[in-house]
Amino acid sequence: MKKFLAIVLTLIMVFTAISVISASAVETPAITYTDHLDTNKDKGYDYDVTNASIAWVKQANGVLVWVPADDTRSDDAIIAQAKATDNSLNHVNECAVLRGLGTAMTPNRNGAQTTITVTDFGRQIIMSIEGKYSHFVGGYTGPTEVEDEPETDPAEPEVPEVPEVKPTEPAVPEGDTGNIRIDVPQKMAVVFADGTVYYGGEMKEVVFGQEYTFQMCSVNWDNGTYDQNGNGIAGTVVYRMTVVHKDEFNRRAQEAKQDPDRYTVKGIDIIDNVAKTIIVNGDAEDTHLETDVNNFFMAYRFHFETENVNKATGIDGVINTPVQSLSVNLPLGSTIACKAFVKDELAATENVFVANNSGEGVYDDVYLTSVNDYTWAL
């Protein structure tokens, strides 16, 4: 009799487990992650990847890509999808894939590794990240086919969608303001979203924790100004600046140093070269927005394949009077229409993409070359 009862109890537990799994397939809402974490702790975070079709954890120069166990693609195809979605992974040296449940580490050969554990909790698949890491990204790309999925009873109420929860920044006291200096290179300017133009040396009042957007501009050499009436050229890249207090800055700097391919970390600011965001230490002794070479602008020198005599370069709104041996500061990441003149006659027009020419993100150990050369085929 006892044996019979044990068998019955076992069957009940099996049927209960099957019911829970089936309910999970129906009730769990799709979840999409696009978060870039602002903080790292020795003990990492837990993420619900129940319906995610791919996710990855980046630590320094290694990335571990996770996919569900039923993903039949090759490792190379899975890694290629992650890199196509996240440009920062194109600089990663080591990549590895974790399928389904289990534990693995970021494949860093010469650096700190991070432990990733994926566990089934019945209704949820949880990814736990233990250790420091640069960022976590995951995505839900479509419905997952479930065999023998029971039909939903139309009388049952719809399960409300679970809102996405993102990490929040520490609260900033209302009215917590300060002043920073705006530093700009020669013959350039910075224009903020409110239309205010800074030519270098001016002070700007800011609210700590508030985001400000701005663009780099080349000024009109004839009058030294930028405006929207034909004087100068505004770059197409929009930068985002936030001023924070010392403790917050140090916390972010420590994180950014884990990913030198993406971030430029200095004593007064942290530059995210991918997202084009700048974090300024508002408590630094000489706090200012430093729009430096290779991160914000590039000096271009224009030459000709043959001798430069009677040949000059001009840029409408900037160099209205063409210059024979021109060296001009231009906003990084922008395409500028440049003109070549021979004996004061227009000979060619080229759209020049303004690019940097050094190891982006490296500051202390590598000398940043500050000039690019452009040669006219004339």
Image (spheres, rainbow, N blue to C red):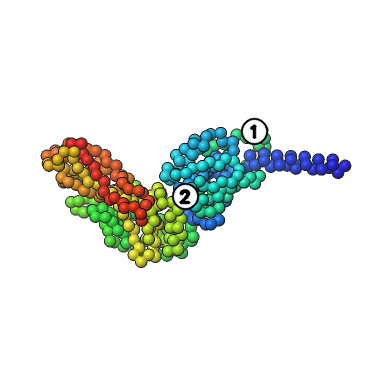
Q: Which numbered tag is attached to residue 147? A: 1
Q: Position of residue 366 (x, y in %)?
A: 34, 52
Question: Which mark sits nearer the N-terminus, 1 or 2?
Answer: 2
Query: Could you tell me which quadrant the C terminus lies in?
Result: top left
Q: Position of residue 274 (x, y in %)?
A: 40, 48
Q: Position of residue 67 (x, y in %)?
A: 55, 40
Q: Which numbered tag is attached to residue 110? A: 2
Query: Considering depth in this image, is 143 or 225 the residue closer to the camera?
Result: 143
Secondary structure of the residue carrying tag 1 is loop
Q: Position of residue 324 (x, y in %)?
A: 15, 45
Q: Which numbered tag is attached to residue 323? A: none
Disc 1 to disc 2, C-alpha distance: 44 Å
Relative to 154, 369 lies left or right: left
Residue at 48% x, 61% y is 171
Residue at 22% x, 40% y is 375
Does 346 appear above or below 233? above
Query: Considering depth in this image, is 159 or 303 the residue closer to the camera?
Result: 303
Relative to 154, 199 lies left or right: left
Which one is in front in this view, the residue at disc 1 or the one at disc 2?
2
Q: Quadrant of residue 189?
A: bottom left
Query: Could you tell me which quadrant the N terminus lies in?
Result: top right
Q: Label 1 is placed on what type of residue?
A: Glu
Residue at 55% x, 56% y is 43
Query: Considering depth in this image, is 250 or 63 the residue closer to the camera?
Result: 63
Relative to 119, 364 lies left or right: left
Q: Is residue 309 visible?
A: yes
